[in-house]
Amino acid sequence: MKKSLTYLLILCLSLIISCAPENPHLPSESSSSEQGNKSLIDYLLKIGYKKDEIKIYGNRFIVQGDMEYNSENDYSINSINKQNINTTLGVNGSYFNVYIEPGIADLWINASKEAIERWNSINCNLYLNLVTSSSLADIIITDNDIRNISIQSNYLSIGSRPFNGDPGEYVTINNDFSGKEGCSNGRIHQGIRIADIQHELGHTLGLGHTEDDPNLWSYIQGTSLNDKETSLMRAGAACLLENFSEGDVEAIQILFGCEPDPNIPNLSAYIIGPTKGNNSGTYTWEVNVSGGMPPYTFEWKKSYTGSSTSYTTFGVYTSSYTAHLPLDKNLYLKCYVTDVQGTVVSDYFVTLNDDAGTGVFKP
Ligand SMILES: [Zn+2]
């Protein structure tokens, strides 16, 4: 049986901000904050959450334990359109910068990097780009101590919801997590951390929980309603999550599209290195890559004759190669470069060996 799933989405379409007159009898700050809280409650109830699924901490709202809203944002939407899956995940675009706060635990830093790689390996337009400055970030992975907030102790982390076309601002790890009873042997292992960050990144990118009522949300057309056992986006399962299900991958590919993004320049690669050498030298060849979507992978092949069928792989998978020339032979190199979308390009390069015996290249 084909597995797939329904995703429940928030559609943060263009916002219409209504400017209600402020109550003159109340301090304006309190008035707008109360108004914001009331609007957000109304909105969350309207899209189908139940009152007891909403917890309020000042202007921060936590829904179903791990989805964070801020009442200063107006999440109201033009329409809830189940048919429109292409543009309305709640985020605009498919290339986002992610900053990992260096102050979070090393295990969580590593888990975050792995989770980002898993998102990027879905092989679609979607790309999460790690940046080293929070000022460049669309999404910040941090923890509750750094943010100075408290999170319910039975939730491993929370993810902010998209707002105004941007991804949710934070994935926040809960250092005070005490729900380990549900975890294997009461322990959190690295696989749980990775899957958990994957899940919360899903919330920042617009995904809800697969258990939610699809009639009240936008769901991804063409995916089934029955992927609740394996989906990474099922709720309340911090210690059971492993990785994207087949249905998750299918759904994310539908949402973000797998056609090449016209804004991304074509992948190209060229090799630089010595055009001549001899038996006694050591030489380095390097492939320069541009365009496409990083990260790239490399595979070098070589030949001593240059005929198209004579190239063989020799175990070098980095962007450069350092070696002697083959004894008394010319060296013909090819490098295949693959980007994260699976596009492959190659270049070839010839280094003539002055000791190759032809006499032509000797002084
Ligand atoms: Zn969740």
Image (cartoon, rainbow, N blue to C red):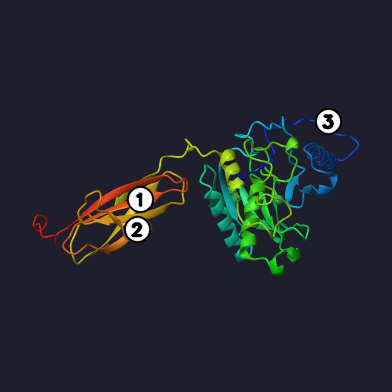
Q: Residue at x 79, y 37 (%)?
A: 43
Check disc 2 and give the amino acid type: Ser
Check disc 3 and give the amino acid type: Pro
Secondary structure found at label 3: loop
Q: Residue at x 49, y 37 (%)?
A: 259
Residue 21, disc:
3
Residue nearest the viewer, comparing 357 with 215: 215
Dot 1 or dot 2, earlier in sequence? 2
Residue 262 in percent (x, y) is at 47, 35
Q: Label 2 belongs to which residue?
A: 320
Check disc 1 and give the amino acid type: Tyr
Q: Distance between the residues labelled 1 and 2?
A: 12 Å
Q: In which quarter of the image is the N terminus?
A: top right
**Position above or below: 66 against 17:** below
* Residue 131 shows in this picture: no
Q: How crowded is mark 3: few (under 14 residues within 10 Å), some or many (20 or more)?
A: few
The reply to whether discs 2 and 3 touch (Cβ–Cβ < 8 Å) is no
Residue 195 in percent (x, y) is at 63, 56
Q: Which residue is drawn at 84% across and 33% down?
A: 22
Residue furthest right in the image: 25
